[in-house]
Amino acid sequence: MFFNKYPHRANFTFAEEYPEPGQSLKIGDRTFEAVAEHYANGIIRLKVQNRKLWRENLCLAPVDLPGLDRTTSLDVKVKGRNGKTLLAFVPGGGFGVSGESHMFQFAIGDDAKFYGMGEKFFGQIELSGLRTKFWTTDVWSDFHFSQWLEHVADPPYFSTPYVVANIGGEWIGFLLHNPYPTFIETPGTDESRVFVEWQRTAPNLILGSEGGEPNLYIIPGPTLAEVTRKLQRLVGTVPLPPLWSLGYHQSRWEYGGDKDLMELDSKFNEHKIPCDGLWLDLDWMDGFRIFKTDSKQFPKGAADTAAKLAKSGRRIVPIIDPGVKSERGYKVYDHGIASDVFCRNVEGKPYIGMVWPGETVFPDFSLSRVRKWWAKYAKEFRLEGYGACWVDMNDPSTGPVDPTGMRFDCGRLPHEAHHNQYALGMQMATFDGFLQAKRNERPFILSRSGFIGSSRYAAIWTGDNMSSYHYLKMSIPTTIGMSLSGCPFNGPDCVGFGGDASEELFLDWIKAGFLFPFMRNHSIKDSRRQEPWAFSKKALGIARHYIQLRYKLLPYLYNLFIDQEERGDPILRPLIYHFEDPEFANASHSFLVGPSILQAPKVHEGNARFKVQLPEGKWFDARTGSWRQGTVQVVPEARETPFFIANGSIIPMQRGVPTSSKKDMRNVEIHVFACPGTSGQSTYEYRCDDGISYGYRRGKRSSLAVTLKWSGRSVEVTTQQTANGFGRIRPRLVFHGISNAKVNGFAVELTSTRVRLSGRMLSAVRVA
């Protein structure tokens, strides 16, 4: 597999005419069945079939399509609000084939800008003038270290062949629903990158695959938000995760078992730092044998340690790799051989790779019976006392052995047919096993690799990274790209996995990532320790504050995940998601957390000043308590991070300063931010439930409707509990920028209070 070479349009034969449905499409001497299926909400599916070339679509996770309206010729045109054509096939070059490969070419406006592409390490959110392939890799194994250390390594771990284009102020998303290796080429050229002609990309948008049935979804909409919601509903919104999974997590490749975990538990309690998950890398296993706990690490069993940690509200989260040690006498291997569950090589024998246990075999997750086999082991594993798991090395990583020798479906399908979705199959099986173990408990699984549909089963971390400003800076556009591409529950290894973090980098990364959808501090063995107490006393205090602030804002974060499940909005968003000002078209290092919070963290070494451009309107500066607009000049300070809240925001928070993992979602503070001298109104619905069960789907959820009207320094707030399934919500109102208030029609007495968000203590008032 060539990672950085791509099919060229000159080697394809293209259709000259596109007949109506029911008539065969001809390309050379070959015939195809080809239609454009038009669904509700404007979604279009371009489907081409030829059973001599391609089997039926092999994607493991189906898409959730709205109702079918009609079918038309493959040669579709997408028009905008004013009737102008936004998108059309390139004349004489719209759809073509080259052997088993296929290609779509679209004529698109010269002013088009491109976003998404899932997990890409390009370091920018706008993606014009790029060629890229979608093929999951084990980056540290598949690329030389000089490539990934400080440069772009492409393709990385997670594969999402999706791109969304802004064309004249309107938006169109393109999803290649095909597990084979796919590719996208966007028009538009940064001339500084063009030294020879072949570095110039095509003038048209190209999407295609090196195999597999052509299956392209076109998703138009007036805004990026609407297109993103449509995509998310198509591939599957994120099921509401357990509340504890949104907390802070501590990991290191050296933690082994009971002794290490109890020491960590004691340290977090001592330093009053909330932490929900303590993670184990490879050392918990007996000789790298998956599903087999090392009795030396857990002398009394994992359940005993789990029970002790539960007193502090913490869970054990161990790693699980797909590779099964090829060893007779090892239960999982023997049972797998007897059940014929392992991928085969071209000789019809179990395919052998070389990873942590040495010679290793791999379950064939493309088969439902194999996923059921794996799920039984996952169920037993969950019942041992482990609270969750992370599934790693599922790219799949095969060490120095060529993975293309691994075949699927009892050896009948080539490796490329399922390579990209190998991790998805593992996620599906593990999720099912965990659900069997605890029927009324939401599973939590973290995965390194994944594919279209992974959003239904697992959160994603963006793979092995380095403790460097290069990776800190790159983490923001990478997470934004994934958020726009149907995988919003994601985040990097905070502070970096490889190398030694300086104290400055440690603090900058904690401050940048404290509101990312997923937050795990993870490091490699033999590197500098990077637990919060591993640095100076000053650094410990700053890190503690931002971890505590994440917990204070958990009600806000949790409600964003509720919105994700119900509507499809991502948690972390680019500024253009809500503010389509051209100025923000490539704002790659500032971002929104939901609609109300804007972060623009320091992502460079040293104390050089930098500018933050705020969207239109007034923004509350969480560092100073002042109101800002326009351009803000930032002078870096260790205790602060640029953090702004939109005028008129209503933000639920936990009361006080959280010093443990305990979460009280019913006794909530409702913080109201209203700029003096302005007026307006806004609404917010706060929802809470037990944070762990599926009871909320059966009505066991409470909700509170909050309405705000403000003018000058006065506000009128109404609160109404609209659902009581989880009991009574007891809101305490806190006002920023306000001196007079009416609540539910009555004037209320206000008393002074103090709140620390970013930096100094701020003055506010609350209802007495």
Image: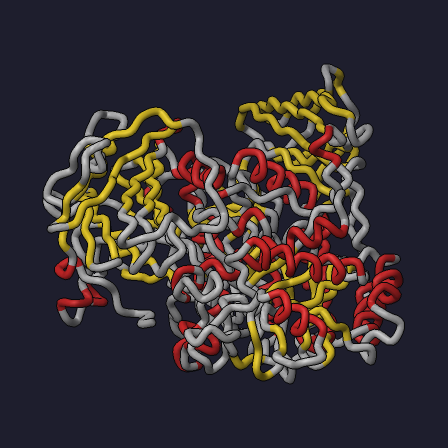
Number of numbered discs: 0
Residue 218 visible, this orientation: yes
Picture coordinates of residue 313 (x, y %)? 82, 55
Locate the N terminus and report the quarter of the image it occupies.
Answer: bottom left
Picture coordinates of residue 650 (x, y %)? 63, 33
Task: Indicate left or right for 140 with 89 as reference.
Answer: right
Residue 275 visible, this orientation: no
Picture coordinates of residue 415 (x, y %)? 41, 66
Q: Nearer the viewer, residue 487 or 591?
A: 487
Q: At x 68% / y 46%, what residue is drawn? A: 553
Q: At x 53% / y 61%, what residue is drawn? A: 423
Q: Is residue 618 above or below residue 429?
A: above
Which image quadrant is residue 341 in? bottom right
Q: At x 47% / y 78%, what residue is drawn? A: 141
Q: Nearer the viewer, residue 732 or 128?
A: 128
Task: Indicate left or right for 164 with 722 as reference.
Answer: left
Q: Nearer the viewer, residue 565 or 373?
A: 373
Locate the C terminus and report the quarter of the image it occupies.
Answer: top right
Task: Indicate left or right for 74 with 323 as reference.
Answer: left
Q: Residue lying farthest top? A: 745
Which image quadrant is residue 106 in? top left
Q: Is residue 554 above or below residue 367?
A: above
Picture coordinates of residue 180 (x, y %)? 37, 58
Task: Indicate left or right for 753 with 85 as reference.
Answer: right
